Image: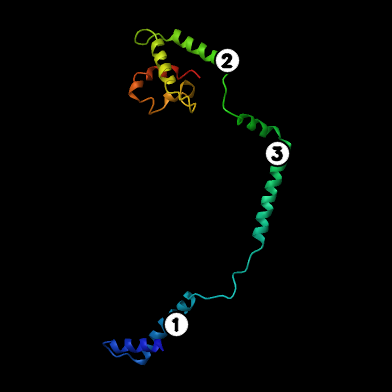
């Protein structure tokens, strides 16, 4: 019904009268593909969902089972690989007397080799650096101080009270 009404309004609005032959040819040429397109583009409703593919879940389950089996086999064949990682994660580094002695020797050697600071020695500026680092220690929380080496980072290194300590930090940087 709608097609007939549309065809009638088009023919009534034309300036030249349409003949039966041109109207039929034009309608057959344009209406049939248009109707086919409309029918294809309409949404259809189904009574049930899409058919389920049962093989993908089984495939992923098999892959997961194979990965677990491979991990178990690797763990049982190489038990030492995981125990070394656990030893490193036990806690923070606790320096010994020998570690402190090595650092002391390295600083003493560097002081003897580099005597080209302002007054001939880096000693006074290193004492000032140690004083300022220790002044940041918080007894309640156990943070700050020389052991945290927080003077290397801003905003503490950029603070006005720590001006001039960059030379001492640069002097100690190569010592590990």
Q: How many marks?
A: 3
- Residue nearest the observer in this picture, 45 or 35: 45
| Residue matched to label 3 | 75
Of callouts 2 and 3, the N-terminal one:
3
Q: Earlier along the polypeptide chain: callout 1 or callout 2? A: 1
x%, y% of residue 9?
Answer: 32, 88
> In this rendering, is residue 11 above or below 40?
below
One can see residue 24 in this view:
no
| Label of residue 97 in the image | 2
Side of 13 relative to 34 (left or right): left
Task: Please indicate whether residue 155 sits to the left or right of residue 84 in the image.
Answer: left
Q: Which residue shows up at 73% across the image and 38% down it?
A: 76
SS category of the residue bearing label 1: helix
Label 2 and label 3: CA atoms lie apart by 38 Å
Q: Is residue 172 above or below residue 58?
A: above
Position of residue 128 measured from the top left corner of the image (x, y, whole percent): 39, 15
- Which is more N-terminal, label 3 or label 1? 1
Q: Which residue is mark 1?
A: 32
Rendered image: mark on residue 96: none
Q: Would you call the spot at circle 2 few (<14 residues within 10 Å), some (14-19), or many (20 or more)? A: few
Camera-nearest residue between 134 and 67: 134
Q: Would you say the residues marked 1 and 3 are in contact, meaning their CB atoms lie under 8 Å apart?
A: no
Whole-percent x and y of residue 80? 69, 32
Element class at badge 2: helix
Q: Residue furthest left?
A: 15
């Amino acid at each position: 019904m709608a097609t007939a009404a549309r065809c009638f309004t088009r023919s009534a609005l034309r300036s030249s009268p349409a003949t039966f032959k041109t109207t039929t040819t034009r309608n057959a040429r344009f209406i049939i593909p248009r109707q086919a397109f409309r029918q294809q583009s309409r949404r259809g409703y189904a009574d049930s969902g899409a058919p389920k593919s049962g093989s993908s879940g089984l495939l992923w389950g098999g892959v997961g089972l194979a990965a677990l089996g491979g991990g178990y086999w690797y763990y049982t064949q190489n038990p030492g690989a995981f125990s070394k990682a656990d030893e490193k994660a036990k806690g923070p580094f606790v320096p010994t007397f020998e570690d402190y002695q090595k650092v002391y020797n390295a600083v003493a050697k560097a002081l003897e080799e580099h005597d080209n600071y302002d007054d001939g020695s880096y000693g006074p500026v290193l004492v000032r650096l140690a004083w300022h680092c220790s002044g940041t220690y918080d007894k309640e929380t156990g943070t700050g101080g020389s052991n945290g080496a927080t003077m290397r980072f801003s905003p503490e290194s950029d603070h006005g009270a720590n001006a001039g300590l960059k030379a001492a930090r640069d002097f100690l940087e190569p010592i590990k």
